[in-house]
Image: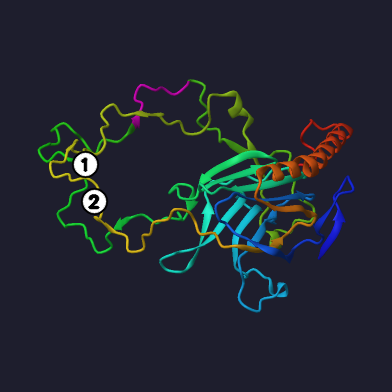
Amino acid sequence: VWKHAKSEGHDDYGLLVSEKAKKYGIVKELENAVEFKDGTIILQFETRLQNGLECGGAYLKYLRPQDAGWTPKQFDNESPYSIMFGPDKCGSTNKVHFIVKHKNPKSGEYVEHHLKYPPSVPYDKLTHVYTAIIKPDNELKILVDGEEKKKANFLSQDDFEPAFVPPATIPDPDDKKPEDWDERAKIPDPNAVKPDDWDEDAPMEIEDEEAEKPESWLDDEPEEIDDPEATKPEDWDDEEDGEWEAPKIDNPKCSEAPGCGEWKRPMKRNPAYKGKWHAPMVDNPNYKGNWKPQQIPNPDFFELEKPNFEPLVAIGIEIWTMQDGILFDNILIASDEKVAETYREKTWKPKYDAEKEKQKADEEAAGLPTGLAGFQ
């Protein structure tokens, strides 16, 4: 259930996830579509994980134009989006998503392109502001609390999975490795011969013939004896429970002697041991290296000067989360970085500073080291 509620500790309101273990969805259509042309586009919003985030999302979906007749009531996880941006945590997943659904100009299919190595989600329960700056020169910047955490290029082969631009060549799927192709760099020396004195059957260890039994070794004493203080329980029935036997304890005589029971010579490493003989390795005269199929032109290759981002026509929150207390606030789309910066300084920073002060006071009151209160 969505609620318009105050953030903990101050009077700033936001959109609140109020119940645990539920799916949430809400969408707001924009008055005018946001077009990606020759200017910069900034996506920014604040979120506060007041009860932490063990498993769930706190991201936004920026929807592309929907099918004719679509209404906000039909918004769900299948509603096509252009960009998905924001925190997501569950198990080993901990990242600030940035995903673009881009239309392949050759196939016409939409493909999800995920930012590689995105920033991690802050581990505290304070308000944080997330900013994505999309520039016309194909540069992307991800800021957390106004600090740059990730820079990427939409056309780089290393920054998105899969890359926006497919490789120009691909391995030939019909190419086969020749039967005589030898990938072994080293081979056993075919001319090597096992030495005559190499005994493969010699054991690794042998008895130490020089060892002598200590004079005070107690051959006739067992290592364990019946506990002399143990008595048969009064309710023990030999017919039902079997013959009673006293529990065993360590023989106290053995603790005062070098040892008890049968003495055996200790084992030592066999100086004659060599193990199984193997011919030494030599360079393989027939070595050809690791075989790879030949490269052929990629039939799905296309050139791209810049991604063709779909217009943004609505902003939606569609999440499933095990935590309540997630608060969204100050969702902004701008074309001027100064505008986004001003919002951070005037709306986010005062809240964050107030929350930090309260956290510090709570830590001092609880006797915790500074910086631990409020962490998940």
Residue at the disc numbered 2: 291
**Residue 109 visible in this rendered orientation of the protein:** yes
**Callout 2 secondary element:** loop
Residue at 66%, 44% in the rendered image: 337
Residue 357, x across and y down, in percent: 84, 35
Residue at 78%, 61% in the rendered image: 20
Residue 181, x across and y down, in percent: 17, 52
**Callout 1 secondary element:** loop
**N-term-proximal mark, 2 vs 1:** 1
Q: Quadrant of residue 25?
A: bottom right
Q: Amino acid at mark 2?
A: Trp
**Which residue is at the far front?**
38
Q: Is 272 situated left or right of 42 in this image?
A: left
Q: Nearer the viewer, residue 252 or 206?
A: 206
Residue at the disc numbered 1: 185
Q: Is residue 367 above or below residue 118?
A: above
Dominant SS type (magenta) = loop
Q: Quadrant of residue 199?
A: top left
Q: Nearer the viewer, residue 355 or 72?
A: 72
